[in-house]
Amino acid sequence: MERVSILRLEAPYRDEDGRVRSVFYTNETLERFYRSNGYYPYLGIGSDALGSFNRWKDWQALLKKTKIVVFGRKTEFPPSENEAWLAAYCHRIYRLDTPVFEISSTCIRERAFAGKSLRGFVPYSIEKEIGESYRERALHDPDSSTPS
């Protein structure tokens, strides 16, 4: 499976009208990936994020385009709140039996914006790229320095 830098898909942090943006929705990133590669990638998320997935922008469209790969976290979501939609889309969601990871994208963004080391949080091969990208984003859009 090919690892693709989402940062390259979001660069240069501008919308179609040329305005600098600090927020990209997952659907937009997937569409940019599709235009560049001709297929939709799997979307990896933590089990904690799956609990609120049905509140993401255009979540049903996401599930039509891609399959979700779910990694374990200490915080699981309450199944009673999610049973109906999970049952309807179970063929698009794959839970991995992996060790529990308490590293989230929010944690990585917060460290990058603060200029802290990302060693141990991301693969070494992309550590520098991620740090520079978030620092650059904060320079161009000060509101982006508060991770979303």
Image (cartoon, rainbow, N blue to C red):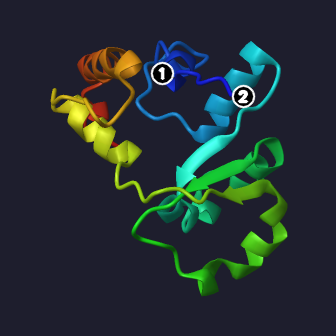
Viewer-side residue, 24 vs 133: 133
Report the mark closest to the observer, 2 or 1: 1
Q: Residue at x 31, y 24 (%)?
A: 134
Q: Residue at x 71, y 57 (%)?
A: 94
Q: Amino acid at mark 2?
A: Glu
Helix, strand or loop under label 2: helix
> Which residue is at the far bottom?
80
Q: Is residue 104 above or below residue 100?
A: above
Q: As drawn, is 78 to the left or to the right of 104?
A: right
Gap in Å between the C-alphas at discs 2 and 1? 14 Å
Q: Is residue 52 above or below residue 87?
A: above
Assess whether mark 1 and mark 2 are in contact (beta carbons under 8 angstroms).
no
Which quadrant of the rendered structure holds the C terminus?
top left
Residue linked to disc 2? 31
Q: Is residue 102 above or below residue 74?
A: above
Which quadrant of the rendered structure holds the N terminus?
top right
Helix, strand or loop under label 1: helix
Residue 86 picture quarter: bottom right
Crowding around mark 1 (Cα neighbors within 10 Å: few <14, some 14 to 19, many 20+) is some
Q: As drawn, is 105 to the left or to the right of 109?
A: right
Q: Residue at x 25, y 29 (%)?
A: 119
Residue 88 picture quarter: bottom right
Residue linked to disc 1? 7
* x, y percent for residue 60: 76, 55
* x, y percent for residue 2: 65, 23
Q: What mark, if any, has residue 30 been given in the picture?
A: none
Q: Amino acid at mark 1?
A: Leu
